[in-house]
Amino acid sequence: MFKKIMISVGLLAPVCVPPVHAEDFSKFAFNIGGGVSTPLSPTSNYAGISGNFDVGAGYNIDKANSIIGEFSWNGLPPDFRRLHPVGFPFGSVNQYALTANYRHQWSHLGGSRFGVYLIGGGGWYYRHASVDRSFVVQSGTVCVPAFTWWGFACTNGGFVDTTQIASKGTSMGGVNAGGGFTIRLSDSGWKFYVESRYNYAWSRIPSTFVPVTFGFRFN
């Protein structure tokens, strides 16, 4: 699945990023970074804190406004402080996203190297759950939301459907919004940035999380 997503990123890049020439290289925007991702309710009922990765490329309309296409990954590991490991599913959950975003920035606050920006957008979110092979659902197990989170189906009687394998992935639409702080490096177009963005993806159990990302940007 990850291979398919990376192929999608490759196909998306030519659409999001116009041809770059020496005379208009400042029109090109790029960012890459990683950090920590914190789930919010209701996701925090099933997942704990993990890492994140983000890479993007796009077009600077002018010095203040940009359109950015991004690929991101956020880990959503089981939070055993909330889910007791005995009798409940366990394994790993990963949240991927391909989004188109608008960014408005103030690059030089008071003529300094420091800047701030706002960013927001939306697109395709994909949550992939991988249940540990050693986990077996016992017949007659009550279908609580934790099983739905892992992709198990429920019977009309309210029990886990043991005849169906847990769903491997869920596609959903989602949105994000947040802001960041930048420090220009030397007199180049490169900047170090720190960013926090709220993400919400619609599903039977929504994905809600806030990644804090540290990285480098060009323009």
Image (cartoon, rainbow, N blue to C red):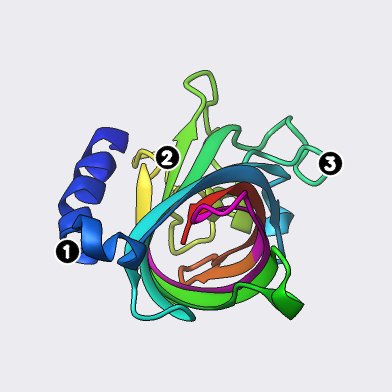
Nearer the camera: disc 2 or disc 3: 3
Residue 16, percent across and down?
Answer: 24, 64
Q: Where on the picture, by quarter, is residue 88?
A: top right
> Which dot marks residue 81?
3
Quadrant (top left, top right, bottom left, bottom right) of the N terminus: top left
Element under disc 3: loop
Badge 2 amino acid? Thr
x 72%, y 45%: residue: 48
Q: Earlier in the sequence, mark 3 or mark 1?
A: 1
Residue 94 placement, left or right of 198: left
Q: Earlier in the sequence, mark 2 or mark 1?
A: 1
Badge 1 amino acid? Val
In three-dimensional space, the C-alpha distance between marks 3 and 1, rounded to whole angstroms, equals 43 Å
Badge 3 amino acid? Arg
Element under disc 1: helix
In the rendered structure, which segment of residues is drawn in magenta? Answer: 172-196
